[in-house]
Image (cartoon, rainbow, N blue to C red):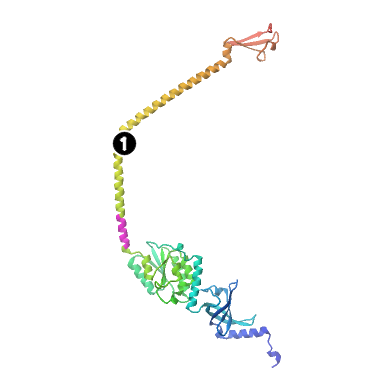
Amino acid sequence: MELGDSIYTVGRLTRLIKELFWQTDALREVAVRGELSSFKRHTSGHLYFTLKDETSSLRGVMFRQDARMLGFRPESGMQVLAFGRVDLYERDGVYQLYVQRMEPDGLGSLHLALEQLKASLEKEGWFDSSRKRPLPRLPRGVGVVTALESAALSDIVKIARRRYPAIRLVIAGVTVQGPRAPLSIVHGIQRIARVPGLDAVIVGRGGGAREELWAFNDEQVVRAIGRCPIPVISAIGHQTDVTLSDLVADVRAATPSHAAELVVPQHADLELALAEQTVRLHRSMQRRTAHARDRWKALVDRAPFRRPLDIISQQQQRQDDLFQRVEQAMGRLLDAKNREVGALLGRLDALNPLAVLARGFSVCRDQEGRIIKRATDIADRARVSVQLSDGLLHCRVEERNLE
């Protein structure tokens, strides 16, 4: 073999090694346990880190679409289980683990992830008491989101039918355990929320180990319960088991049976309450009727009801008195006004030019009608007119005597 046949370029050798990775079935699906180191969340949403143990280290990457499905917040120093494939990164010539799914390793790490998620949701206000809604006193129908053929569902149905046989129950069967459980529970809540006529919904399952209840700590389940448009009662496990779904629900029940007791009214209690309300209503009507009767008697005993014609005659007399007083006042007012008018007429008569003429005075005007005030204002032989109280004289000036 010639030397040239065994010489590779870097790129060609790298691609050859990459093909070997692809041809090895054992590297296509692997699960790796290790400690996270040099963890970095890129602005793109991709996660870059190193997995290490006592002897070795392995570079890893988790792309954004897979990282969005994480149920916890990875950090350096955390023990994890990473699931994915081993492949060669051609640019750097190094092999690394392409992670598709990751979960905390061990119950301790799961609790750490749970506390991280709890703190994040609490900061967003999902657990605030102000968001809690009261349960309806008389629900038209109740939805149940749990596993079909489960003891929890059997207990809920049995208690509900015993307490109120006519209650409407709508069941959404879901998976409550395992990796498919969170999405199944979310879809169940969403289906129940679209059913008309439901006033409350029970979400839960029977008891089990803490790991078996873990689906009800899933972030998507918690948010689905918080967004449900009708009040939610959580009934998950036993009284000592507390999940994030319990914290976000409007009401937490100790068990599924307790949840049914909380939301479904007791038929006998309703009958008793109705009877008590009927008695109270009857007594109230009796009191109001007696009070109205007493008021009517008091009104009838008053003078207007006993002597109605006397009251009318008195009012008529008062009306006549008022008319008389008005007429007298109007007469006094007219007399005063007449006196004022007479005084004004006397003053006008004193100023009237005709009245002055009646006392022997006259007014002399020239032919143009101008009043002649002085003898020098008119020429000899001029024609003038003299206004007297009873007529007009036409004269000619024969002579003027000036003083």
Residue lying at 62% horizontally and 85% vertically, measured from the top left = 17
Total residue callouts: 1
Circle 1: is it few (<14), some (14-19), or many (20+) Cα within 10 Å? few
Residue lying at 65% horizontally and 85% vertically, measured from the top left = 13
Instruction: Name the one closer to the observer, 367 or 176.
Output: 176
**273 sits left or right of 345 in the view:** left
Asked if residue 346 shows in the view, the reply is: yes
- Quarter in which the N terminus is drawn: bottom right
Q: For the magenta stretch, what is the residue range?
A: 269-279
Circle 1 is placed at which residue position? Answer: 304
Q: Is residue 359 above or below residue 160?
A: above
How would you classify the magenta stretch by its main secondary structure? helix
Q: Is residue 243 above or below residue 352?
A: below
Residue lying at 50% horizontally and 69% vertically, measured from the top left = 119
Asked if residue 389 shows in the view, the reply is: no
For residue 276: magenta?
yes
* Amino acid type, mark 1: Pro
